Amino acid sequence: MSPRSLSRISLLFLVLALAAVLAFAACKDDEKKTGTTPSASPTPAAIDISGVPELADGKLLIGSDIAYAPLEFYQTGTETPDGLDVDLAKAIAEALGVEVEFVNSGFDGIIPALNTEEFDAVMSAMTIDEERSQLVDFVPYLNVGVGIVVPAGNPNNIAGLDDLCGLTVAVQLGTVQEKQLKTLNDETCGDNDVKIVTFDTNPLAVEDVVTGGADANFSDFPVAFLDAQQSDGALEVVEPAPNPQPYGIAVRKGSTELKGVLTEALQAVKSSGKYDEVLAKWDLESTALP
């Protein structure tokens, strides 16, 4: 090979090297301008979901009554779900390496809808109780008490559940609070029963108190607290009842594999610190599972 050929090859290598340096510098300059780094391929989830039929399509479909802030609600003017349950479900889905999608479903019929496979699981501020546990299985994820919303000044001097006897109480249909009021009538109130007025959603029940139709609204404490906060001084909340009960992610009785990986994913979310972050975001650290 002649010296001239060697010179041409050396020049070619020099040009290629210079081009590589300039390309790298441009990439770094773009990085500085945008404040981001080039996206990387997602890290595969460490949890094996290969034997879970509900997740075979790469999606976790969750049924929820999306009218129960701050647990689940739509962002104002949108159909975008938000809330503690939504954030926690996203973290669980990320741990499983799948997408998550919420399906709005009325609370009173949400367990039948789950059992007819309209979705894979329910995450809807659902308190675990004996009756529900006969129909579905649960993965506990929060520990929540109940609260009583009353007009500002508490004109009926309600201090606890027994003080509701003889009053009109607005409550969401199908909730554990509706059951508790019926038990109160059966076991405590005698001839002075609570007049139970049911509504399809909790916001409608709260509005009944605001307009004077009911003396109180009975719901989960985080919801009651937020309702009072957002009432512009029209409402206040009575202190929560003792002995809080856990919320659970509900799955069908036959969904053994799904229950197993959801339990594993929730533990991974806790271990990563994301669980505490989500609760802190919604000022609900006190509801963490023991």
Image: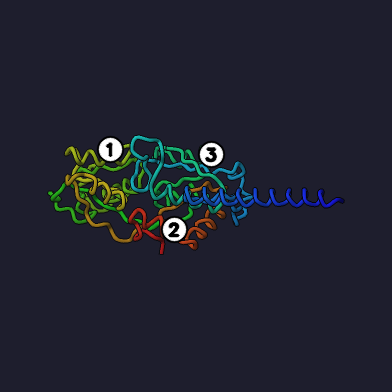
268 vs 8, left or right, is left
117 vs 176, left or right, is right
User: For mark 1, does the 10 Å Cα neighbourhood hold few (<14), some (14 to 19), or many (20 or more) residues?
Assistant: some
Point out residue 183 in the picture as x, y percentages from the top left corner: 30, 50
Residue at the spot of label 2: 275
Give the residue at x 60% y 41%.
Answer: 57
Give the residue at x 41% y 53%.
Answer: 247
Q: Amino acid at mark 2?
A: Tyr
Q: Which mark is residue 204?
A: 1
Distance from the alpha carbon under mark 1 to that under mark 2? 31 Å
Quarter residue 140 falls in: bottom left
**Residue 129 seen by the camera:** no
Quarter of the image where the C terminus is located: bottom left
Point out residue 104 in the picture as x, y percentages from the top left corner: 43, 37
- Of the image marks 1 and 2, the number of the one nearer the N terminus: 1
260 vs 102, left or right, is right
Point out residue 128 in the picture as x, y percentages from the top left corner: 42, 53
Q: Which mark is residue 56?
A: none
- Of the image marks 3 and 2, the number of the one nearer the N terminus: 3
Give the residue at x 48% y 43%.
Answer: 62
Residue pushed farthest right? Answer: 1
**Residue 267 seen by the camera:** yes
Residue 19 or residue 202, whichever sits in front: 19
Residue at the spot of label 3: 117
Element at badge 1? helix
User: For mark 2, does the 10 Å Cα neighbourhood hold few (<14), some (14 to 19), or many (20 or more) residues?
Assistant: many
Element at badge 2? helix
Q: Is residue 157 above or below residue 174?
A: below
145 vs 273, left or right, is left
Q: Amino acid at mark 1?
A: Leu
> Tags 3 and 2 in contact by the CB under 8 Å rule?
no
> Nearer the viewer's eye, disc 1 or disc 2?
2
